[in-house]
Every structure is written in C-alpha cells, then in structure tokens.
Amino acid sequence: MGSFGEKLRREREMRGVTLDEIAAATKIGTRSLKALEDENFAILPGGIFNKGFVRAYARFLGLNEDEAVADYQTAANEQPVSVKQIAAQSAIAKANRLAAQQRDESNALGGFVRAGVFLLVAAALAYGGYRLYHRGFFKALKRPSLHRQLKQQAAAIPNTPVSAQAPAQQETQAPAPAAATAVSSTAVPAEFTVGIKATATSWLSVTTDGKRSFQRTLQANEQQDVTAKSEVKIVLGNPNGTELSLNGRPLLLSGDLTRPRTVTVGAGGLVVQ
C-alpha cells in the first residue's frame, strides 16, 4: 500500500471514524472505501467514479479534495494533473451546478409568485362577496319587520288577541349566527440546542436524531449550533480544543481529551462520554 492509501487511513483513524460511518454518509459501499485505502483500484468502477469516491471520502474527513484527487492519480498511475488544474475543473463544475440550482430556484420562485397572486385574487373576491352579503343582510334588518306590521294592524282593529301575534314573532326572528368551531392546537414537540465552539482547530462530525447532519473543521473561536428533538451524536477530532453547551449551559467533558472521541447529548445533558 502506498502513501495515498496510508494517508486516508491515518486521517480517518485520527478522527476516530469508521468506514461504516463514511459509507452511511456518502452512500459509497464499505468495500469501495476499503479499496481506496488498500489502493486496490482494480475493483473500483474506474474513471470519474473513482475521483468522485476520493472527493466524497476527503470531504467527509475535512481534507482538501483537490489534493486528494491529485494523490489518487499519482497512486493509480493516471496521467498526472496539477492540483491547480484539478481545482480549476472543480470550480467549473461547481459553477455549472450553482447555475443549474439558480435556474431551479428561479422557476420555483416564479411558481410561488403565481400561486401568491392567485391566492390574493381569491381572497379579494371572497372578501368582496362577504361585504356584499352582510350589506344586504343589514339592509334587510332596517326594513319594517312583519311582526311590527302585524302589531300596527292589530292596533287598528279592536279586540285583536295578542296571542295571534306570537307566531309572527317566531317567524321573523333572525337566525342566530353559527357558533365558531374551535380549532384544537397541536402540541409542538420540545427541542433543545447544542452549541459546539472551537477554542482551537477541531474536526467534527454531527448526527442529529439518527440522521447525519454535517462534518466539517471548525477554526478557533468558530461556533456551530445544532437543534434536535431526541439526541445529538458528535465525533470530536480535538476534544481538548472544543467546548459544548446545552441550551446555553456549558457541558463538562471528562476523561482523556487528547484523542478523538464520540459524545452523545440528550435533552438532559451528556448521555455517553
């Protein structure tokens, strides 16, 4: 095994990360990842796929992707390409992906705008109908009621029983407005926030509620906050250079802080150290 595979394995083991964790995050089979470390390139698909595997592996560990691809090409005896050329090719590919993403976002924004206009028009029509309905209703209330007309007629005709006016009163009562239906509120599940602050350069990998969130390298005085409902699992490359907090309260790490380690934080504090 040459320096390329040895470097990948050494960087991975320094961070306390297993091949299974990288496979789960990158969707690359463990067999292919081990082939990279063993420099057994014959069992890999070849070509651009191999370079993609190398980039994903390096990205997970926080390594320079372009340098990793250049090291791979040297180890695989491919036509040597400088790191600058690889970086330029990567920049072009990223620019193309960004342009495609912006087109998609623009199309999505246009769809939202059209939907918003439609909703505004529908709301205006509904409000106009509501106002017209209530205007007609209140005008009807201002007209002389049938009950009042009957009373006037009864006053004009002597000995008219008052009881004869009761049905008219019942018939002319305005219908009571329908009771508003109460909408039950849905309880919002409790969440908590874990703060990760680097006091020195520190690599970390974070899994939130069983799903891989991100992996990156924090520089000194840089902080990353993570919100979860059940637990946050953190792989710390430099525990001695990292501070943790739960909802703003510091969490104290114990034990050996000179080697990479994995900690789990729940809503009540540290679960595993």
Image (cartoon, rainbow, N blue to C red):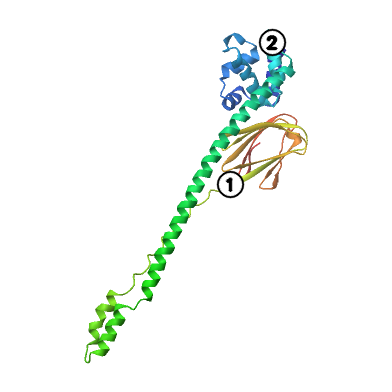
Residue 116 shows up from this direction:
yes
Which one is in front, 209 or 86? 86
Amino acid carrying label 1: it is Glu
Residue 182, image x and y in percent? 43, 60
Q: Label for residue 191?
A: 1
Quadrant, the C terminus: top right
Does residue 98 appear left or right of residue 110 in this picture?
A: right
What whole-number distance in Å separates the C-alpha atoms at marks 1 and 2? 47 Å
Which one is in front, 22 or 170? 170
Q: Is residue 128 above or below residue 167?
A: above
Residue at horizontal 68 percent and vertical 31 percent from the top: 216
Q: Which residue is mark 2?
A: 75
Residue at horizontal 68 percent and vertical 19 percent from the top: 8
Helix, strand or loop under label 2: helix
Residue placed farthest to the bottom in the image? 158
Residue 184 shows up from this direction:
no
Amino acid carrying label 2: it is Ala
Which of the 4 image quarters holds residue 258?
A: top right
- Point out the tag, 1 or 2, that comes first from the N-terminus: 2
Q: Is residue 43 above or below residue 241?
A: above
